[in-house]
Every structure is written in structure tokens, then in C-alpha cells.
Amino acid sequence: MGEAEQMQGVSIRDPWKAVRQALGQALGRRGTTRTGPDGFQEVNVVISGRYRPDRLVVQQGRPVRIIFLRLEEDACSEWVIFSAFGLEMPLPPFRKVTLSFITDRCGEFLFTCRMGIYRGVLVVVPSREKAGVESTRTGEEGDKA
Ligand SMILES: [Cu+2]
């Protein structure tokens, strides 16, 4: 059994790394936003080295659903914090965690890890403006294809 446990400890993480890099690069580049049948503006954010995408544009006064998928065990992604909304959410690794809210406050609101190293921006625009996602590039990711 010792051998199997060792394999779990050692080998299982390497496949994940490849998977999360591929996923993170694909999703982080493009991102997705859509309005579901329930009227929610839905955005997927993959966490792998950073938030991907890291700039989420949503419309004020309409419900938002952000689905975080943490594809790593880095301490930086254990929590996501929207300090402007007084919100802190734990993010278990390799699971989806959904954050639903609605806000009438327009503006740019930071979301971060506990240390402020991972940083994203939630942009709330007036309802007549367009929602979407973007990835900002800081040039420090080192993960470009
Ligand atoms: Cu951190």
C-alpha cells in the first residue's frame, strides 16, 4: 500500500498541473459570460496562478453568478475576498464554488486573495452598457502559450 500512497502523493499532481495549465490558458484568455434562463449573468473564473479572466464586467441591478473553479492548491487561492462588499469565500481546491449577488453600485471593485497577490476587478456598469470579461495582462504570468 505504501507504493500506492506514494503514487497518490507524487503522481496525481502532475496530471493536474498539465490539465489546469491548459484549462487556465484556454479559459483565461477567452472567458465566458452569458445570461442564463433564470436571468443571471453568469461568469466562470478559473484560478490557476491568478484569476482567469481577472476582469469581469457585469450590469448593475441584474443578478450575477460567478463560478470559481480553483485548479490548484496554492495558499493564494484558499479564499477570495470582495472587500467592498464585505465578502470572503473559502475555495476548496478542484471544486466549483458559486457566488451569487446583485448590486446597484456601479464602479470597479477589487477581488483578491488574502494577501492581495491574486487580484481581479469586478466592473459594474449601468444596465445599458455591455457585460463581458477581459483578461488583463500584467506581463508577469510567464504562462503565455
Ligand atoms: Cu495570496
Image: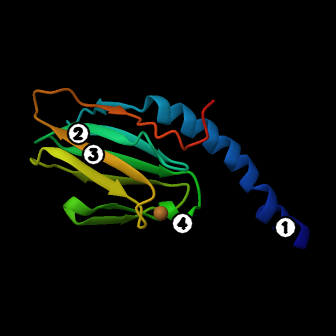
Amino acid under label 2? Answer: Phe
Horizontal side, residue 65 vs residue 12: left or right: left
What distance separates the C-alpha of mark 4 from that of mark 3? 22 Å
- Sequence-wise first label, 2 or 4: 2
Which disc, if any, is residue 6?
1
Q: Which residue is mark 4?
A: 75
Residue 2 % position (x, y): 89, 73
Disc 3 is placed on an element classified as: strand
The residues bearing labels 1 and 4 have C-alpha atoms spaced at a distance of 23 Å
Q: Give residue 126's quadrant in the image.
A: top left
Comparing 98 with 20, the one in front is 20
Q: Which mark is residue 25?
A: none
Q: Is residue 23 above or below residue 103?
A: above
Q: Are marks 1 and 4 in contact (CB under 8 Å)?
A: no
Q: Amino acid at mark 4?
A: Ala
Q: Look at the image and tell me whether residue 66 can be seen.
A: yes
Image colouring: rainbow
